[in-house]
Image (tube, rainbow, N blue to C red):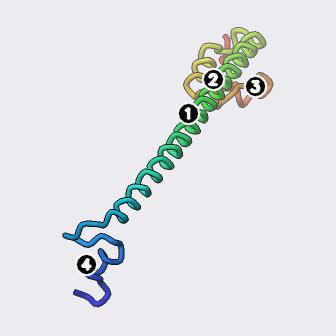
């Protein structure tokens, strides 16, 4: 055994846990208090974290739904402006596919270029 390593008995004495020796009632009481105190604290922390995640999920879902709605309304506006030259259904499908991340602007040709077609 290296001189750096402590034996299990030495570690047990330092921590109050010696293999083969029963702990005293005072040690058991302290361990139970620590166990229940930490469990209550962890439960409360766990609930707080779960509630925070639930809240953020709801906010993210509402935000995504709002962006999709804005995107689809912009597609409808562009369809009214450009008529047959604008593929409104393709635009709306892109809104849903990309969850409203790409919002078309009818006055910005670059943002609506994928949805424009040439009529002959």
Residue 65's disc number: 2
Report the mark closest to the observer, 4 or 3: 4
Could you give the CA–CA distance between mark 1 and mark 4, rounded to whole angstroms? 47 Å
User: Which numbered disc, 2 or 4, marks the residue that appears first in the sequence?
Assistant: 4
State which quadrant residue 87 falls in. Answer: top right
Q: Which residue is mark 3?
A: 105
Residue 113 lies, in percent from the top left, at: 68, 26
The answer to whether residue 3 is left or right of residue 59 is left
The answer to whether residue 33 is left or right of residue 13 is right
Could you give the CA–CA distance between mark 2 and mark 3, rounded to whole angstroms? 18 Å
Q: Are marks 2 and 4 in contact (CB under 8 Å)?
A: no
Q: Secondary structure at mark 1?
A: helix
Q: Are marks 4 and 3 in contact (CB under 8 Å)?
A: no
Residue 28 lies, in percent from the top left, at: 34, 61
Residue 54's disc number: 1
State which quadrant residue 6 falls in. Answer: bottom left
Q: Which residue is mark 4?
A: 9
State which quadrant residue 8 falls in. Answer: bottom left
Of 111 and 18, the residue lying toward us = 18
Q: Quadrant of the C terminus?
A: top right
Could you give the CA–CA distance between mark 1 and mark 2, rounded to whole angstroms? 16 Å
């Amino acid at each position: 055994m290296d001189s750096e390593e402590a034996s299990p008995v030495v570690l047990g004495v330092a921590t109050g846990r010696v293999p083969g020796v029963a702990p005293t009632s005072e040690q058991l009481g302290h361990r139970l208090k620590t166990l229940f105190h930490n469990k209550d604290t962890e439960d409360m922390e766990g609930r707080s974290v779960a509630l925070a995640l639930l809240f953020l999920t709801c906010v993210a879902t509402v935000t995504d739904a709002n962006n999709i709605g804005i995107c689809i309304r912009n597609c409808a506006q562009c369809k009214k402006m450009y008529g047959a030259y604008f593929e409104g259904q393709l635009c709306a499908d892109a809104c849903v596919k990309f969850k409203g991340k790409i919002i078309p602007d009818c006055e910005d040709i670059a943002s609506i270029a994928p949805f424009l077609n040439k009529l002959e």
